[in-house]
Image (cartoon, rainbow, N blue to C red):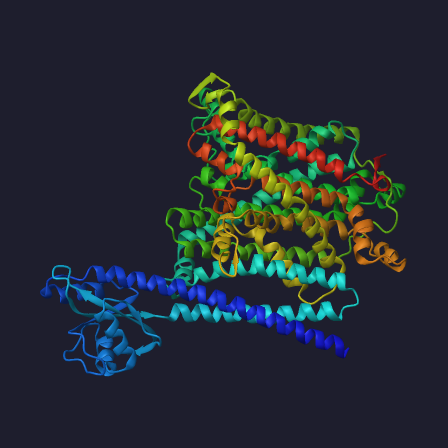
Amino acid sequence: MKKQALHFILMMLFVVLVGYWIFTSVRDEFLKQSRASQRETVETVTAGYPSEPENISAWLTRLAEEKNTYKVAFVKNIPMPGENLNETPEGDQNLSDLCMKFSTDPEFSKGFDHAAYEEIYRSVKNWTIGTEEEQALFFAPAVNLKTHDIDGALIFSFNTEGERGFMNMLKMLFGAAFILFAVVIWQVMMSRDPIVGFALAGLFLMTITFVAYPLFEALRLSFIENGKFSLGIWKNILNSEGYISALIGSLKLGCWTATFSTIVGFLFAFVVARTNAPFKKLISTMGVLPVISPPFSLTLSIILLFGNNGLITRWLRVIGLNFSIYGLPGLVLVQTMGMFPIAFLTLGGVLQAIDSTYEEASLNLSAGRFKTFKSITLPLTVPGLLSAWLLVFTTSLADFANPLLLAGDLRVLSLESYIEVTGMNRLGHGAALSILLLLPTLTAFLVQRFWVARKSYVTVTGKPSGRITELTTPGVRKFLVGIILIIIFFLILLYGTIFAGCFVKNWGIDYTFSLENITEAITRSRDALFDTVTLAAIATPMAGIIAMIAALLIVRKKFHGKRLLEILLMTPFALPGTLVGISYILAFNHAPIILVGTAAIIIINYVIRELPVGIEGGIASLRQIDPSIEEAATDLGADQATVFRTVVLPLVRPAFLSSLSYTFVRSMTAVSAVIFLISARWYHLTVLIYNFSENLRFGLASVLSTLLIIIVFGAFGLMRLLVRENSNLMKNVT
């Protein structure tokens, strides 16, 4: 025990040294940028010094009235070192009084000396000016541009409240990180199972570095205004009826989309996994098709078909029907069609893993098929249903591409945040609005966890049954398949529009048949296509394995900070992509971690952003598996790594495969975050598609979208070959 305690002390000493180096690097980089910005302001203002002496007072008055972040005083006739001022300085009264009081101070003497040699000097120490504390002073020469003589010195004072606020927040962050590291390292070194300990340490390190730290940067921005710590941004947002209306609009859109998507996803998953219905391969294929394409493809198809000048809209007007696809109904429709695959992929693994023994027992006790479904099957899918609803809800809240095109008069926070960042260049407002979206997401997350924790959903307690009981009559199967075929027909109509766009010169303008788009699109996208596939292929297995490890630890292990780890792992999915992209640029564009412009930051973004889907699917599947199966393997001498590889992973294969598939798809079709992270070396296919669509080159966008769908479907088949179905887990509907 003493040896372990000594190792712990040495490890914590190492953590302190590394943490101090990182802390000082971040602090120095921030202060360097802040002071460089102040110096640039001094240079800009000094360049406007008037050449005529009679204009100096008016110039100083104008600067004071502009309510800048600085104050200025003008000292005429620079004094010699150690001498008092001959005249009272002009400009800000408090700053003038400070100059008269400390004119012989060594710092003032040094500042005046630099000004005499036409140099800008920043005082080493800060000063108390009037009622304001911690003011930074700059001394600059007042050069007459006509005579090129030095008329005197300009003294600038900058409030350092923003710097102090940042330092306090930085100290709190590193203090919390140190405590967390101490707890994790203690658990790793004192744990009987070091593999679990190292896995926990790795997950905590990953989430702190790539979730908490960038989010802290975004949070910091929301409290900085004009270079100073301020609550003005939040006051403006919380007192604005427009932003409150946008929050309500986001909640409405998220709830309706999540509800309809979960219903449609459950319908697809139930027919595929629990019935003997025909067309299963078609249903499965169409069930994942919407999530394969770029997120704005369906929106463009909807507009081209049902927009104000859409093909179907024109035909409906001929027969006297007028409607508008813009607004809440249109957004719910397009988001449901685009997001129900999230529910389908999540619920497919859950429904397939349910042991039919309970259903058979219910039927043997004379319960009807519907009653068995209502009292046995449906309750056992509650974890999956809630997980699917939560994932779709958070995806809907964070989506800005669809509202950007279809919102109409509906205001949503994701779009408001995007406009603040890209349209108004107000990063603080955009960050604050995006952070506001976390409140409903975290509320839904906690409610879901509380509901699931109240009951047990274990159904796999030994060797799984090889049969799936058919709970639908032929008539019900036909009815369910009929509804699905209607949805599939609508999807085919939408994607048919994309496919048709490949062979016309310019959809909506010139419908002449042409193959020019195919040749031009492939030629212009060669490099972007290679980069996209390469980055997605690297990120996919990493995200899948990390998701299953995290799900296993969350469901099976008890450790301090479990709730915090869950929240950190789920948080990236709730953040708008614009906020994630900007946060990563802010966090990883300076020491100690410089990743901007590299492939690593794009891969990390893929892994972190898509982990929640795999984790939710893994948690839902693991809740159905009796822990005694893993305990039996452990009792027979298997370590945790072997248990995970030979027992857990095969049992959660559907969820694991869904995680791989979803990560690859999202990596191939990402837009919002990656658009900020691409560089000249690493480009992305969907950004190219977005640029073509924005420039009304819909033919080129259609070709690349079709090519993207083909690539992803090929990858799906390859993943199913690499991760084969365990023969002991295969089920047949009876």
**Residue at figure coordinates x 58%, y 57% from the top left:** 442
**Residue at figure coordinates x 49%, y 69% from the top left:** 24
Depth check, front residue: 1 or 407: 1
Residue 238, image quadrant: bottom left
Depth check, front residue: 452 or 535: 535
Tell me, yes or no, if residue 617 can be seen here. yes
Tell me, yes or no, if residue 479 can be seen here. no
Q: Quadrant of the N terminus?
A: bottom right
Depth check, front residue: 726 or 576: 726
Residue with the most extreme top position: 513
Up/down of 250 relative to 454, above or below:
above
**Viewed as shown, does residue 683 lie left or right of 161?**
right
Residue with the most extreme front position: 117
Residue 179, image quadrant: bottom right
Residue 266 horizontal/vertical position (percent) = 69, 40
**Viewed as shown, does residue 288 lie left or right of 87?**
right
Up/down of 222 relative to 376, above or below:
below
Q: Quadrant of the C terminus?
A: top right
Residue 283 horizontal/vertical position (percent) = 69, 31
Residue 667 horizontal/vertical position (percent) = 59, 42
Residue 615 horizontal/vertical position (percent) = 68, 51
Depth check, front residue: 720 or 485: 720
**Viewed as shown, does residue 715 lie left or right of 307?**
right
**Residue at figure coordinates x 48%, y 65% from the top left:** 26
Up/down of 432 relative to 295, above or below:
below
User: How many numbered dots are placed on residues in this image?
Assistant: 0
**Viewed as shown, does residue 323 lie left or right of 55?**
right
